Image (cartoon, rainbow, N blue to C red):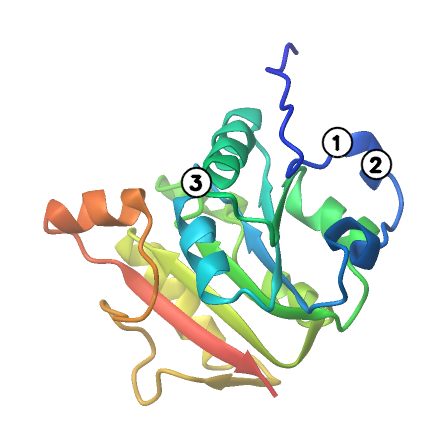
Amino acid sequence: MNLIPIASPRFIEPEKLATMPSWGEIFANNNPIALEIGCGTGDFIAQTALLHPDWNFIALDYYNKGCLKTSKRLDKQGIDNVRVVRDEARSFIVRCIPPVSLVAVVINCPDPWPKLRHRKRRLVNAEFVGFLSSYMRPGADFHFATDFDDYGEDVAAFMKDMAGFDNILAPDLFRHERPQYPLSKYMMKFMSEGKKIYFVHYRKK
């Protein structure tokens, strides 16, 4: 597979992540680490990184095109507290994220696999959130958003029964608006079409 080279200093070449990296050396500080799984074109992570200059962000995506666009966006805006990684989420986390280290995990609009026979392929389920939990600090935030009704309702339903998490949106299981939450262009496109975004927000106890 031919991949477009990514020359950005904010992109970490895959060969540098074959084993557990020193994130303190990569970011040149020891600020807490937050992870976005599926950064798309980087508009959400760029906004969020500016809101939290005291956090280091890893923008993870499986697709080279998304990593390229995200890197270019960060370079253009001069945002230095984000590093872009091209990898599969679970493999990367096991290999490169220390246990009990993440201050936040964000998953926005993952592939909904809308056909009934494909829904077992969805990334976010109770097992995956349980897996993520062991890499999150006490007090770490889990943010999920989707434009697909069934996916939003499914995640909201199982999260209320997840041990070790508090619902920050209680008494609601989800909301369709979060005024302080940065919106990606993808989210805004769907909202302009009259579609609803399902926002879920939990915090590790």
Please tell me which residue is depicted at 41% across the width and 55% down the height of the picture.
47
What x and y, as percent, mark residue 175?
A: 27, 72
Between discs 1 and 3, the one toward the N terminus: 1
Which residue matches tag 3? 117
Compared to residue 2, the image places residue 159 above or below, namely: below
What x and y, as percent, mark residue 23?
A: 79, 55
Compared to residue 5, the image places residue 14 above or below, namely: below
Neighbour tally class for label 2: few under 14, some 14-19, many 20 plus, Cα within 10 Å:
few
> Considering the image in quadrants, where does the C terminus appear?
bottom right
Is label 1 or label 3 in front?
Answer: 1
| Disc marking residue 77 | none
Neighbour tally class for label 1: few under 14, some 14-19, many 20 plus, Cα within 10 Å:
some
Going by the image, does 114 lie left or right of 119? left
Disc 2 to disc 3, C-alpha distance = 37 Å
Q: Secondary structure at mark 3?
A: helix
| Disc marking residue 13 | 1
Disc 2 to disc 1, C-alpha distance = 6 Å
Q: Secondary structure at mark 1?
A: loop
Mark count: 3
Q: Secondary structure at mark 2?
A: helix
Amino acid, disc 2? Lys
Report the residue that reaches farthest toward the right. 19
Image-quadrant location for residue 155: bottom left
Amino acid, disc 3? Arg
> Considering the image in quadrants, where does the N terminus appear?
top right
Between discs 2 and 3, the one toward the N terminus: 2
Compared to residue 162, the image places residue 34 above or below, namely: above
Image-quadrant location for residue 186: top left
Which residue matches tag 2? 16
- Front residue of this view, candidates 81 and 154: 81
Amino acid, disc 1? Glu
Please tell me which residue is depicted at 53% across the width and 44% down the height of the picture.
121
